Image (spheres, grey):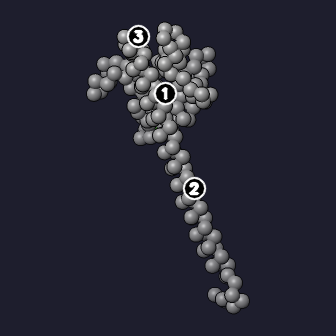
Amino acid sequence: MPRNTSGGFTIVELLVVIAIITTLAGLLMGGVMIAKKGAGTKHTKIIMGNIAMALQNYKTDAGDFPPGNGDIASSETLYSMLVGTSGFGPYYSSNDSKSFRDTNGNGKMEIVDTWGRPILYTRGESLADNKDFELLSAGPDGEVGTDDDVKF
Ligand SMILES: [Ca+2]
Ligand SMILES: [Ca+2]
């Protein structure tokens, strides 16, 4: 292959450099994505911690935790019990308008995770480890039952 003697780059050298830059940029983007994912999960855990605290306060006043079986209706019940002003509430509030959404469009709000999906609430004997309740987020992929789910 003829070598460029002017001190510049040959096409091959240029292609190699471009390939290296592309790879590095890809790695960097991947890192940013992972960091974003991690931040979202962390944020959702903080939301769940706050809900758990609100649930304890609710129980102190009401005598028991709200009912819930992990479906979206239970998320709506959770919202109305914690964010609603009935009884001694609200037990949970947020200045962030993205904290609450009506994800299924039935006019009843849910408390949502970082990705805008409802935080699922289960209360009952079916739970392992004698937990009083469980909070579940589908995580970054939006699917329940995968590795990235966030649980409390
Ligand atoms: Ca709803
Ligand atoms: Ca998931």
Which residue type does callout 3 highlight? Ala
Residue 119 numbered tag: 1
Residue shown at the point (56%, 35%) measured from the top left: 115
Badge 1: residue crowd in 10 Å (few <14, some 14–19, many ≥20): many
Image quadrant where residue 127 sits: top left
- At 46% from the left and 25% from the top, the residue drawn is 51
Which residue occupies the foreground of this view, 102 or 98?
Answer: 98
- CA separation, marks 2 and 1? 28 Å
Whichever of callouts 3 and 2 sits on the residue coming sooner in the sequence is: 2
Residue 67 in sight from this viewpoint: no
Question: What is the CA distance from the residue labelled 3 to the residue labelled 1?
Answer: 22 Å
> Does 64 appear above or below 43?
above
Q: CA distance from mark 3 to mark 2?
A: 48 Å
Checking the image for residue 83, the label placed there is: none
> Amino acid type of disc 2?
Met
User: Does the beta carbon at disc 3 come under 8 Å from ligand 1?
Assistant: no
Q: Which mark is residue 62?
A: 3
> Which of the numbered marks, if any, corresponds to residue 29?
2
Residue 115 visible in this rendered orientation of the protein: yes
Q: Which quadrant is home to the N terminus?
A: bottom right
